[in-house]
Image (tube, rainbow, N blue to C red):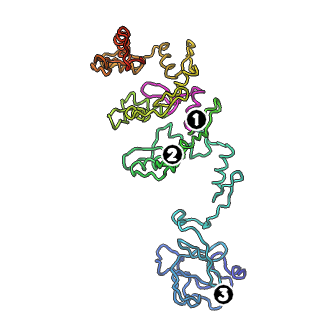
Amino acid sequence: MEDLQSDISSDGSSGRSTPERCPRPLYSPDSSEEDVNILEDNQVDEQDENLVYVKVEVKEEADEVDGRDDKVEEIPVEIGTDGRYRKCNMEKHHIITPDGETEDDEIPEDYAEENPITPNHSAEKPYSCNKCRKRFTQKSFLQRHQKWHSGDKPHSCPVCGKCFTQKSDVIRHQRTHTGEKPYPCFKCGKCFSQKSFLIRHEKVHTGEKPYACSECGKCFTEKSTLVIHERSHTAEKPFSCSECGECFPRKDSLLTHQRSHTGEKPFSCSVCGKCVSSKSQLIRHHRIHTGEKPFSCPICGKCFTHKSNLVYHERTHTAEKPHSCPECGKCFTQIGNLISHQRSHSGEKPFFCAECGECFSRKSSLSRHRKVHTGEKPYTCLKCGKCFAEKSHLVTHERIHTGDRPFSCSHCGKSFTDKSDLVKHIKRVHVLAMENGSQQDPSIADI
C-alpha cells in the first residue's frame, strides 16, 4: 500500500510511468455525466497492473477485474488525503483500496440533508466538556458551551449594557430596543423578533400540541410549557428568592418578584407613562386605554381583560370554591383571598404606608390608601367627567346615569345601585322590624 501511495503524485498521476492526460479537466463545466471517466480504457498503462483506475461509469471490464457479477452503481468519486479514492452516496462511504476491495464507513441516513457539503463525514463528537461531559462535533461549539459554566459574558449591549455569552444573543436582544421584528407569520402577518418565536406561534394556526401531561392529559405546543405545567402536580418550585426565600415554579416569576425588593419597574406605558415590573403587566395595563377585553365568559358573555379574571368569574356560575381556610373552613374562589383571610386569624399586616405608617393585610388595600396621599383619581366618568380613585367607585357611579340597580331586597323588592346600600337597608328596616316583633328572619340573621 505504501509503495503504491509513494508512486502517486498529488495530482493523481503515477511517478513510474506517466499515462496520457485527458484532453480536458475531469469535471469540466461542459462535461456530461455519461462522458466523465477518470481514465479511458485505452489510456491505462499495461505495466501498471497494481494501480487501480476508478471510473464513475463502470463498464463490463471493471466487473471482470473486480470479480463480481453484480452491477455497480454510477457514483461520484473523490480522492482522499490518504491517496485513496472514495465513492460517495447518501448512506455509505465506499473506500476503494488499490486491490479493488471496498471498505464501508457508516454515517447516518439523514446526514446528506443536514450536511449537504462537508469534508468531515464522521458522526463522532470528539470534543467533550470537562464539567458536565457533554460532547460536541466542533471545538467552537464546545468553547461556546463552556462559557455557560465559567459565567463569561464578553458581549454587551451598547444601549443598556446587558451582557451575553454570544454575539448572536446581543443581536437578538438589541431588537428589544429597536423594535425590529424580521420574522413574519404568513398566515396572519404577525411579526416576531426571533425565529423560535415564529415557529412557536405557527403552532397556533396548525393546532399542533405534541406535548401531553402524563397526569391530566393536557396538551401543550412547547415542551418547556409542559415542564412548567407538571410542577403544578408535583408542587415543585425550584426558583427561590435570595432576599426572602419565597419559591416559584417559573424563573420569570422569580425575576418579577425580585423587582418588588429592588423597586425596579423597567416597563413603561407609552400612553400615560405608568411603569410596571413585568411585560405581562404592561400588556394588561394597555387594555385600560384600548378597552380591549379579549376573554369572554361562555355562559353569560361577560368580557375580561385578563384570563385569570375570567377563570375566577366562571366560578361564580359553578359555585366552585377550591381554596379553604384550615382554621375556620371558610372557602374562597381565589387563593389570594384565602391568604388575605388567614391574616385575619394571625393579625399579620405586612403592607405599610410609607407616608403615615398605617398597616394593611392586603396589598390592594395599601394601594387604595396611597391615593389618599397622592390625590390620584385615574378613573373618569365618560358622561359627566367626575373622577374616582377606585374603579369600583366609578362602576357604581355610572349606574346613576344608566339607571341600573342590580341589588334588590328579597323582603320588599326595593333596588339599589350598590351592594353596601342594600346591606344598610336590610339592617335598618327589616332587622329592626324583626327585633321589635321578637322574630328574626333566618335569611338575615348573619347580617
Residue type at the position of mark 1: Leu
Q: Do the residues labelled 2 and 3 touch (CB within 8 Å)?
A: no
Residue type at the position of mark 3: Asn
- Count residues near mark 3 (Cα–Cα under 10 Å), then give few for <14, some for 14-19, many for 20+: few
Give the magenta-colored segment's residue range: 251-278
Residue at (62, 66) in percent of width and height = 122
Residue at (43, 50) in percent of width and height = 203
Disc number for residue 225: 2
- Which one is earlier in the sequence, the residue at label 3 or at label 1? 3
Disc number for residue 50: 3
Measured from the top left, where is residue 22 in percent x and y?
A: 55, 81
Say whether residue 214 is left or right of residue 2: left
Disc number for residue 254: 1
Measured from the top left, where is residue 169 in percent x and y?
A: 57, 44
Residue type at the position of mark 2: Thr
Cα separation, mark 2 vs mark 3, equals 64 Å
Residue at (60, 35) in percent of width and height = 247
- Which one is earlier in the sequence, the residue at label 2 or at label 1? 2
Cα separation, mark 2 vs mark 1, equals 16 Å
Task: Between label 3 and label 1, give the one nearer the viewer.
Answer: 1
